[in-house]
Amino acid sequence: MAKKILVVDDDEPVRKSISVALKLKGGFETLEAEDGLIGLELAKQHHPDLIISDVVMQNLNGFLMLETLKEFPETADIPIIMMTIEAQKDRDWKTGAAVEYLAKGFTLDELLGKVNSILNNKPKS
């Protein structure tokens, strides 16, 4: 069974590109959300193995979505990759969770490498 990844980004071309790449090159099943509110709902409904999220979005930004996910036992342990232009600066954000960061402008190989590393090291539930 393919691992399920939720991609949350308000930039549709970016979101679609990541989703298609994950499907075609990684063999993953993907879900897409255009903002953090929809991302929260999809995470609660589908329990993805990983979430890849932009930081700056309308309605609910990536960090607020992350904080909310950590409040629910069924979503608290989902690993998250935060995509941001200022990855180093955002590392200082106190999320209280193990979150990976990926600076925008990343290559497909960098993304797939990080995704595979996280999913291969994720404890079995």
Image: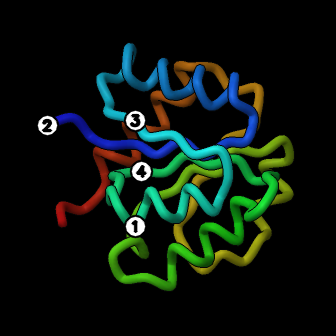
The N terminus lies in which quarter of the figure?
top left
**Farthest left residue in view:** 1
41 w.r.t. 64: above or below: above
User: 76 or 91: which is nearer to us?
Assistant: 76
* 85 on left or right of 10: right
The colour scheme applied to this rendered structure is: rainbow
Expressed as whole percent of the image width and height from the top left, the position of residue 109 reads 52, 20
Give the CA distance from mark 3 to mark 4.
10 Å
Residue assigned mark 4? 50
Q: Give the spatial CA distance, label 4 vs label 2.
A: 15 Å
Mark 3, residue position: 30
Between discs 3 and 1, the one toward the N terminus:
3
Camera-side residue: 112 or 4?
4
Alpha carbon separation for disc pair 1 and 4: 12 Å
SS of the residue at dot 3?
strand
Asked if the residue at tag 3 contacts the one at tag 2, i.e. Cβ–Cβ closer than 8 Å, the answer is no
Dot 2: element? loop
**Which residue in the structure is indicated by mark 1?**
44
The residue under label 2 is 1
Badge nearest the viewer, 3 or 4: 3
Q: Nearer the viewer, mark 1 or mark 2?
A: 1
**Residue 61 relative to residue 27: left or right:** right
Other-residue count near label 3 (Cα within 10 Å), few / some / many at <14 / 14–19 / ≥20: many
Q: Secondary structure at mark 1?
A: helix
Residue pictured at 69% horizontal, 44% vertical: 83
SS at mark 4?
A: strand
Question: Which of these two is toward me, 106 or 22?
Answer: 22
Q: Amino acid at mark 3?
A: Thr
Q: Is residue 11 above or below residue 37?
A: above
Extreme residue toward the top, this view:
24
